[in-house]
Amino acid sequence: MQSPIESQQARVLLQLRDLILKGVFGPGERLAEIPLAERLQTSRTPVRLALGTLEYEGLIEPCVSGGYQMRGYTAKDVVDAIRSRGVLEGFAARTLAEQGASRSLLRALQDCLDEGDKAVRKPQMELDDYAAYADMNARLHTLILEGCGNASIGRLMERLNSLPFAAPSAMLPMQSSIAEGTYWMQLAHQQHHSLVQAIERGQGTRAQALGEEHVEIACRNLEYALDRPEQAAKLLPAIRLVTDASRKLG
């Protein structure tokens, strides 16, 4: 369960990701703490922490003059990173299922599922629900990666998480921008339930397939924007949608 301070930090991070996805900041635009804090009506501390996270996720980069600026990237960059994460997470889930998860790990995973249920089981999710879900989602994925005991997977995942939108919760704000957002969150969390069940039952092949399929929701969100140029202009102007190749997600 998040403390009030952690909850505020999660909301600010979610709001900044959402602003980036909606194209409020263009490639190369400078992002400074004070204007952002004023815009979000919060203090500088959660903004500073959120900017550090966004840099780690590859969405922004340091400016020579100080502070941060938006990065530029292609749709193919995003999809390649997301699907690569799916391969790694699928392998981690399979390894964990086959070697057997401890009772303490299974309890921790179940706690994540319970928190996710509270966030998604409602007619329409609000900002705080997305923030709670994002926190739960990151913890659940981390538990599986660390639980598999393969340090190489962890190192590779750290490198992937520094690419735009590759981190487990990086694409969630886009889902809050479309009418079907709550439905997609519910579907994604149902996949979490199935994944944990496969791990608990020792079903390695099923766990791997579920891990790889899970990231397709993020890819479908990107595809939604690419197939609808008028929506893409509102949702993803930070991504350079300029070639036919970047529209082919398969």
Image (spheres, rainbow, N blue to C red):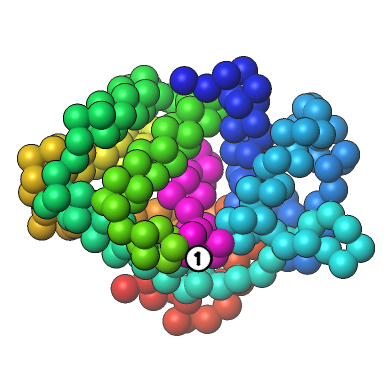
Which element type, helix, strand or loop, lies under badge 1? Answer: helix
The quarter of the rendered structure image containing the C terminus is: bottom left
Q: Is residue 203 above or below residue 121?
A: below
Name the dominant secondary structure of the magenta segment.
loop
Would residue 77 be found to the left or right of residue 68 on screen? left
Judge whether residue 160 is colored magenta: yes
- The amino acid sitting under disc 1 is Arg
Compared with residue 220, is residue 19 higher up or lower down, i.e. above or below? above
Specify whether residue 17 is painted magenta.
Answer: no
User: Which residue is at the front of the view, 37 or 7?
Assistant: 7
Q: Residue furthest right?
A: 65
Residue 145 horizontal side relative to residue 28, left or right: left
Residue placed under numbered mark 1 in the picture: 159
Q: Residue at x 66, y 69 (%)?
A: 72
* Residue appearing at x 88%, y 58% in the figure: 66
Q: Is residue 250 visible?
A: yes
The region drawn magenta spans 158-177
Number of marks in picture: 1
Q: Nearer the viewer, residue 78 or 103?
A: 103
| Circle 1 residues within 10 Å: few <14, some 14–19, many ≥20 | few
Q: Is residue 113 visible?
A: no
Location of residue 43 in the rendering, given as x and y in whole percent from the top left corner: 81, 28
Give coordinates of residue 133: x percent, y percent. Answer: 44, 32
The x, y position of residue 113, in whole percent, is 29, 29
Residue 220 location, x and y as percent? 37, 57
The residue sitting at 62% across, 18% down in the picture is 4
Q: In terms of image quadrants, where is residue 63?
A: bottom right
Relative to 200, residue 159 above or below? below
Residue at image location 14% in from the left, 44% down from the top: 100
